[in-house]
Amino acid sequence: MGRNIVFYFSGTGNSLEAAQKVAAGLGDTELVFMKEAYQLSDKFDRIGFIFPCYAGGVPKEVLTYIKTLKITADMADYFFSIVTCGGGERNSLPMLRDALSEKQITLHYGRALQTVGNYIAMYPMKADVSELLTTADQNLKTIIQEIKTNTSTSIGKAKLKFKLFYKAGNMYFRSNAKKLAVSDSCTSCGSCEKLCPTESIKMVNGKPAFTWQTCSQCMACIQWCPANAINCGKNTYESPRYHHPDVNIDELMHK
């Protein structure tokens, strides 16, 4: 079994769960969270990137990580990506393809994996997501088989309307992050600080303090809070919470 490495970014667990199943399907695969400093030095059979679609594109934190990652085309025979999303991947794969092209790397394979949309700050969560998760799992099995056989896909050009949406969406994220607030039901467990993939939460006097300028709006703090004490605007107060049922909170903590 060949050696593989998968870089992933995840807030509520959809992308981590996909990465874990890809690793199990390929075998001999290392998982690296796209925040950790990592020195690539060996030759791999496959290198993959698994992350969610944010504002119709690649999360800014992921794009920065990939652009600063010291990686070259001769480090793997095959490069692939899976974009988890509530709808379509929009410009995510073209953006990743272009970022890798700047390093003279070819993105051989890219697929969108539709799963549970979790941007609770804009829309309420569905109470029952079991059917959607079952379908996502079935589709992921097909994707894994295609990756195992080094299947190639055609990735189109980035569309202007999604470029504009991405720019506006990221501006909205930063603005909306100002609405993050914690209620008196907070138990001071500190999970939100440990979960935050952008280190935008610090515990101050036993309560989370939010740095909206760096918040990616991944919703991890809201969705995982055991006391439902964190909200972001009026849409979140009465909405059900969601995190992937097959992911343990400890697997997403980065501290």
Image: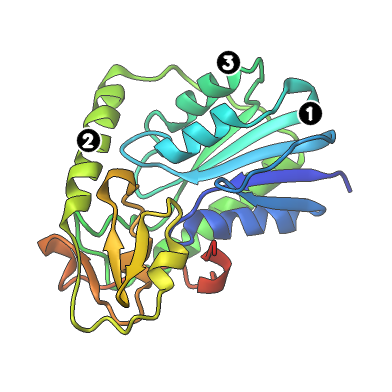
Query: Residue beneath label 3, please?
Result: 102
Residue lying farthest to the front in this orientation: 205
x, y (%) of residue 46?
A: 75, 37
Contact, CB < 8 Å: mark 2 with mark 1? no
Question: In the picture shown, does residue 190 fall above or below 43?
Answer: below
Q: Mark 2 falls on what kind of element? A: helix
SS label for mark 3: loop
Q: CA distance from mark 3 to mark 1?
A: 15 Å
* Depicted 96 relative to depicted 213: above or below: above
Q: Which callout, 2 or 1, points at the residue further toward the start of the chain?
A: 1
Q: Is residue 74 left or right of residue 118?
A: right
Q: Position of residue 10 (x, y in %)?
A: 48, 54
Residue 58 position in % (x across, y down): 43, 35
Residue count near mark 2 (Cα–Cα under 10 Å), binned few <14, some 14–19, many ≥20: few
Q: Which mark is residue 53?
A: none
Name the residue tied to disc 1.
75
Q: Give the structural element (helix, strand or loop) at label 1.
A: helix
